Amino acid sequence: MKDTAAVIDESAESGSTDFIRSIVAEDVATNKYGGRVHTRFPPEPNGYLHIGHAKSICLNFGVAADFGGLCNLRFDDTNPTKEEAEYVESMVEDIRWLGFDWGDRLFYASDYFEQLYQYAVQLIKAGKAYVCDLSGDEIREYRGTLTEPGRDSPYRTRSVEENLDLFQRMRAGEFEDGARVLRAKIDMASLNVIMRDPVMYRILRATHHRRGDEWCIYPMYDFAHCLSDSLEGITHSICTLEFENNRPLYDWFLDELEVYHPQQIEFARLNLSYTVMSKRKLLELVEGGYVSGWDDPRMPTLSGLRRRGYTPEAIRELCNITGVAKSNSVVDISMLEYCVRKDLNLRAPRVMGVLRPFRVVLDNYPEGQVEEVEMVNNPEDPGMGTRKVPFSRVLYIEREDFREDPPPKYFRLAPGREVRLRYAYFITCVDVVKDESTGEVVELHCTYDPATRGGSSPDGRKVRGTLHWVSVAHSLPAEVRLYDRLLLSPAPGAGREGSDFKADLNPDSLETLTSCRVEPSLAGAAAGSRYQFERQGYFCVDSVDSAEGALVFNRTVPLRDTWAKIEKAQRQARAKR
Ligand code: ATP
Ligand code: MG
């Protein structure tokens, strides 16, 4: 695993090009496809898109854009038992949200079923495909292993006429599911196991989300994918490394059929630490109720990240700075957090939000008086202007911003100590009110210095702590959801029996705070809008549960918390002593 700064430096050094863009540039220079560049993003609609898919989306659409080419969106919907229209719709929405446009080129492999069938017939006629009656288990047994060649199926020598007849009857629904398959006739002794007469079609009675019950035979991925690419005139078929061994088969089908031949290029998938990224595993989390749905803000899905407050810009930035590699590696999840902090720092308005409210009464502040305190909306961007926030005698500060017995280097409020209320006044703690039964401090009494209006002292007096606050009477109630890692292991499931990643689930990945208070400017904040709560991190109005008068915020990421770091360092120092 590389650290954030190192990876960012590397990518800055390497410039904006990568090995795939080099290949494409070369092909353009040599006029290989008449100078055309045409890519596609081909998801299977069997789940929601995750951040790994974003990598492929950015690459496919990005390469096309860089070379003035086109990129198609194609649903690779050849497996009706796992695919649903809901998934298609979510994928369309997520790719648009990421910022990419396929124009009028939205395609479905299922639109090619008739054409694919005809290609299969063509291969049968050429003696290159046969109907096989072996069961699935038998096919596996006959296939051999990495070290042993396979054996020919007894059905391999069927005549062209018999194969044509049987395949037509497979389509007509004369045989049970699984009774027969159509296989390519290649080489059972090939060193590449994938080339040992791979299955091209299977019999499967399942209702397809677009074709209904029209078909009871379905093409396999390897057969459908290369031909879909060919039919669409794709030039560079970019896929992930695990398809490297399938490339000879991709080429074989296109060569045998003598059709237009795109080239497959493999790159390393994006892996993130502390994250599972297979739709199958994510589906397990959804179906098992471990999360609230595909768009749970703890999910690495694009819909989850969006709900959490991630911006498309931050996700594209992650895809960009992690580069395009030829070998697999794991990117630290902190890189993603770095990208979103960097983006939101520039764009998110600052607001006051108190997560765990603690009452402070300013004894010398006139009862009933309210002042409008001017606050900067974003110090990074003066163009974002200022706003007025009401200040009064009774305030909430953060519970953790007061310690009765402050440890060393704790610069916030404590008995007798003076701090700054951001943009407002210096206050000094003069008294504490305790719960009689528990002895716990429940309220503070402070005095304010009227000469420090705006948050600075005319006599040059310094304070070391600056706190955020809201006025009790003016603030709005809010619910805030704090998230921790969904999985506790950097490589979830690794080293566990059956690599059960669910054993690594973090029982404390969600903390819901229901008595938070936010400044009144947040009344009616739109779903999905993003803010920096001063000193607390970046927050996004929840798009599902937030409603007029009942604000719900998701914390996207905390700001780096220096106090937590100091405490950790102190704990470690104590442990050494
Ligand atoms: P999953 O196992 O998560 O379902 P998949 O590869 O089976 O992934 P597809 O819907 O077939 O999912 O993927 C569409 C495209 O996205 C493919 O070209 C695939 O290679 C690419 N892709 C999937 N996961 C990643 C990843 N982690 N990094 C980069 N590209 C990915
Ligand atoms: Mg898949």
Image: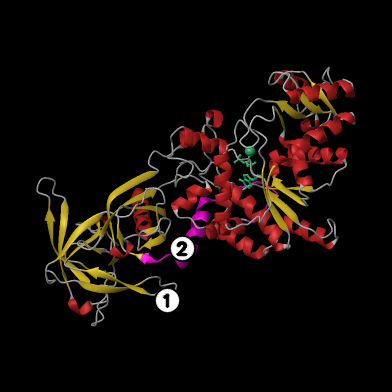
Q: Nearer the viewer, residue 186 or 119?
A: 119
User: Local crowd at mark 1 within 10 Å, few (<14), some, or many (≥20)?
Assistant: few
Highlighted magenta segment, given as a residue range: 323-350
Q: Amino acid at mark 2?
A: Leu
Q: Position of residue 26 (x, y in %)?
A: 81, 60
Ligand 2 appears in which quadrant?
top right
- Residue 506 appears left or right of 498: left
The residue labelled by disc 2 is 344
Location of mark 1 (residue): 382
Q: Is residue 421 left or right of residue 125?
A: left
Q: Residue furthest left?
A: 436
In terms of image quadrants, where is residue 527? bottom left
Query: What residue appears at the point 59 percent right and 51 percent down from the top-left corner?
Result: 54
Check the image and report above or below for 378 versus 567.
below
SS type, badge 2: helix
Between 57 and 89, which is closer to the camera in this rendering?
89
Question: Is residue 21 at all visible to an observer of this figure?
Answer: yes
Dot 1: element? helix
Query: How much space separates mark 2 and mark 1, taking CA atoms?
Result: 15 Å
Badge 1 amino acid? Pro
Asked whether residue 174 is drawn in magenta, I would say no
Label pair 2/1, CB-CB below 8 angstroms: no
Residue plotted at (27% across, 54% down): 356
Horizontal and vertical percent position of residue 411: 28, 64
On the picture, is 177 further left or further right than 8? right
User: Which of disc 1 and disc 2 is earlier in sequence?
Assistant: 2
